[in-house]
Image (cartoon, coloured by chain):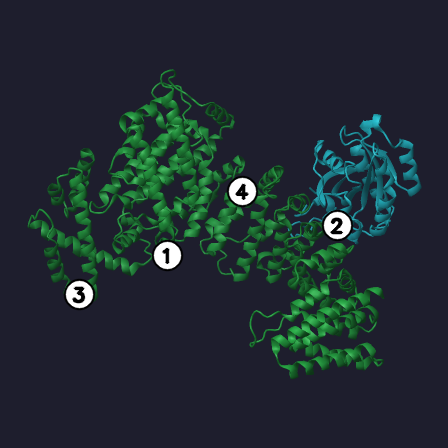
Chain colours: A green, B cyan
Amino acid sequence: MDRSINFRGIAGSAGNIMQGMGKFVFGNEGLESKEDSYVERYLDRISNGTISDDRRSAMTELQSLVAESRSAQMSFGAMGFPILLNVLKEDREDVELVRGALETFVSALTPIETSQGPKTEVQPASVNSDLLSRETENISLLLSLLSEEDFYVRYYTIQLLTALLTNSLKRCPEAILLIPRGITVLMDMLMDREVIRNEALLLLTYLTRDAEEIQKIVVFEGVFEKIFSIIREEGYSDGGVVVQDCLELLNNLIRHNASNQMLLKETMGFDPLMSILKIRRGSAFNFTQQKTVNLLGALNTVELLLMGGPSSESGKDANKNANQASLAQKNILDHLLLLGVESQWAPVALRCMALRCIGNLVLRNPQNLDSLARKQVGEEPHIQPALNAILSIILRTSIAQEFVAADYVLQIQLETPTPSLGRTEPLLHRIVTCLSIAASADGENDQNSHPEESYIQPVILRLLIVWLVDCSNAVNCLLESAVHLNYIIELASSKRYTACVRGLAAVVLGACVLYNASREKGRDAFAVADAISQKIGLTTYFLRFDDLRKSLAHSSSEQQHRKELSRSSANSMSDFQEIEEDETKKDDQHPVLSEIFDSQFVNFLSKLEADIRENIMDIFSRTKTATAVLPAELEQKNGEVELVPANSVESTFEEVLFLENILEDLVRTGGGTTADMSQKPSSGRERVQIEALRQELEGAKRQIEGGSVPYPDVEAIKAQAKEEAEKDSEAELNDLLVCLGQEQTKVEKLSARLAELGEDVDTLLQGIGDETAIPDGDDEDEDDE
Amino acid sequence: MSYAYLFKYIIIGDTGVGKSCLLLQFTDKRFRSDHDLTIGVEFGARMITIDNKPIKLQIWDTAGQESFRSITRSYYRGAAGALLVYDITRRETFNHLASWLEDARQHANANMTVMLIGNKCDLSHRRAVSYEEGEQFAKEHGLVFMEASAKTAQNVEEAFIKTAGTIYKKIQDGIFDLSNESNGIKPGYTVHNSSGGGAGSSSQAGGCCS
């Protein structure tokens, strides 16, 4: 009794506020007071009436009024709560009246959208929610209604609870937690009829979003079993939105919750999860949007499991590792590869997420890394190593997201020190060879274009850096041949290469010093440092780092601006040339570069760079006393590396195969210019046009050459071109002129630069247009430098 | 991971009596003297064998602090067994047993098996509650009693296993309605996957989810 008086007081005062607000918001005195009086009259009939039928009909009318108008919602909030709560308490046997009361509450808590009025105004629905959830007793009353026999009573009650949760997310869960067995009652709803079960799923999803304690209680009550049994009934990933809801609830329960993750693993195991992820090979046709969403939900589950508990708790790493092992045991890799690598018809988001999961599955897990290296994908007769397929994704995709996701996997695979690799097969040597091929292939491309074009060299250099860091065996392997050191020194010093290439080569050299554990004369840290200082000079050498940083900063600032372009053209050299011709900016980098040299890698580089500087300075400050000086921590690191068990011969072989394939691909891309890549044009028509223009241009150049003009007479070129172009349309003519203008700029710039370098510009220009002679000319070039 | 039955346990008692250490000793065979205060509840699991049958124990270790009482009460109903723990070196933890028991009686299943444990029996030189007193209290309230040490592992296995034995016996006696999960007991997984197909004993077959 005391309580209800108290409550009336609160409700009353809140009502006054709302009435005031109502006047302010609607301003329509007449309408408002009319609805006010209706609500009041209905409430009076409900609370004081003696004839059941009349009370029921008053309730029905009240409900429809509240469902329609905001001001009725407001006046009901001001006056009606105590009366209807009393109905719920005292009139339980009158099922129809109870149903009506609940339905009225639901209406009072459901926002009504009006076209008129300012958007910022307070929704009466949310004020009513606050009012209702203020008392734990009310929530408790509602929970008790969930055990009523009448279906509609349970149904409206759960709707009401959901509305409460949506509107006042904080207070309601707290209230439910305070009620003994509160969660238990809600859990029982999962076993109810389908309609109620589905509502209960949503309700639990709201409840478990942030409240860790509720997450645990729900799990204690056996929600995992229920979730998976619903998912099974609904047909796993082929199921409807209910499967999606189940997975959302599941993900809420295990997100950063180590305890629940362990329970899931210990009691259900991951088999049910695998059943959701399982898809039939080539089942392209039944890939509905819902199925995609369901699979994304399940992949999210995998991702959360692979993340483990909250990152702050170091002890929970054990949990993450256990999940990695346990998921791998269930052959999750097969499912993920099918989704991420083999299902080219699957939506991109799905493929990317599967790739990310693969990455997280092998992250810091030698065993899983091993099995990924050993996996094959595809069907007979097109079987290939999984890693090879992932590399192909990197090389061929035109979608930035996918590139990044696939790169993530490969990076982890390569960053892991595999000491046996260096010893058994001089793979590093091949990479260096590949690097030199890429370099000369670049030169072959087109003498008129800048060396900036290529991304092959930076990519290979990045591979080398990643490989060498923290792996003294790899460093040792690289230095086995003196040619390698000389070549990389050349890369770092020659002006022929871009600032980026020179800088990266300098980092490679630095890594050879920093991670050098060799005591062999001529191959130790000092020998490398000495070679640097003799052949490059320390000042110039350190300058390379600054230049590199500038060039990377440039590329990352370009990133935003070029996003559009990189998406459509990340994989094609010819596309890139197109861009070259569109933009005359000299320092333009290939879009792939800005993807590869992301901020993470740039940070990694700058840290490495600092270490290198320090290390080299250190070495030189001690040269007088020691031949090879190794910091203590390096010794230690080396020891650690040795402790890593050597990979099995088989897996090593696989990795070798895989890396060989990378190299082949790289060589092909580097040397083959457009031949290979142009098979997959992303914007075919433009390319054809550009190509046609290019040919015309070349023709024009050849004619000029015939006249043996020392410097290209641009006016003459234009005139020539004009003659030819007049046959074509006006538009093409304009394009051609633009191209010629750009060509002219290039020629001018190059001439100036070559003159700077002391080149004989005249001799050089004689070679232009003589296409068959280019390789020879290029070789001479190399010798000159 | 197939099992004949799954039992849910809770561990209750005042803060600092060693509930989490008992669980850690039982599941991981480890002891940590610097164990953090439990927030809310923590979970542990282990497989044991009773009467040659594999039994899975799911154990919820609750926070002893008063502020978590409303949360921990949510775990009472669904538990088949409870370890009620006090610290033999701290008299007040023994004195609070009655209130814990009352809480359990109020919120738990009537058939819940309660095991009374006097923990830290390795510290007998600092003993504040005699063995006999513990035994007497257990007798009065119909509990099973044992003194144990999470540090030396003495009687830890026994406490958990003996509780399971009591529950198992109650099942044999037909006290539980096993179709009702709220008593904290679940029969082993039956094969609900069509690929299973075997008609043999479900607990042995394991099915896809065990």
Mark 3: amino acid? Asp
Subunit that carries the residue with mark 2: B
On the question of residue A20 being in view, the answer is yes
Q: CA distance from mark 1 to mark 2?
A: 52 Å
Residue A764 placement (x, y as % from top left): 14, 42
Q: Which amino acid type is shown beneath numbered disc 4?
A: Leu
Q: Are marks 3 and 1 on the same chain?
A: yes
Q: Position of residue A658 (x, y in %)?
A: 41, 38
Please give the name of the residue rendered at 28% of the width and 61% of the height, measured from the top-left corner.
A685
Quote the CA–CA distance across marks 2 and 4. Answer: 35 Å
- Check chain identity for marks 3 and 2: say if they share one: no
Residue designated by label 2: B71
**Callout 1: chain:** A
Give the secondary structure at mark 4: helix
Do marks 1 and 4 share a chain?
A: yes
Question: Nearest the camera: A11 or A512?
Answer: A11
* Crowding at mark 3 (Cα within 10 Å: few <14, some 14-19, many 20+): few
Q: Are marks 1 and 4 in contact (CB under 8 Å)?
A: no
- Secondary structure beneath label 3: loop
Q: Which residue is mark 4?
A: A361
C-alpha separation, residue under disc 3 versus residue under disc 1: 31 Å
Image coordinates of residue B188 in percent, x first then y, are: 74, 47
Between label 1 and label 4, give the one nearer the viewer.
1
The three-letter amino acid code for the residue at tag 1 is Glu
Residue that badge 3 annotates: A728
Disc 1 residue crowd, few under 14, some 14–19, many 20+, Cα 10 Å? few
Where is the C terminus of chain A found, in terms of image quarters? top left
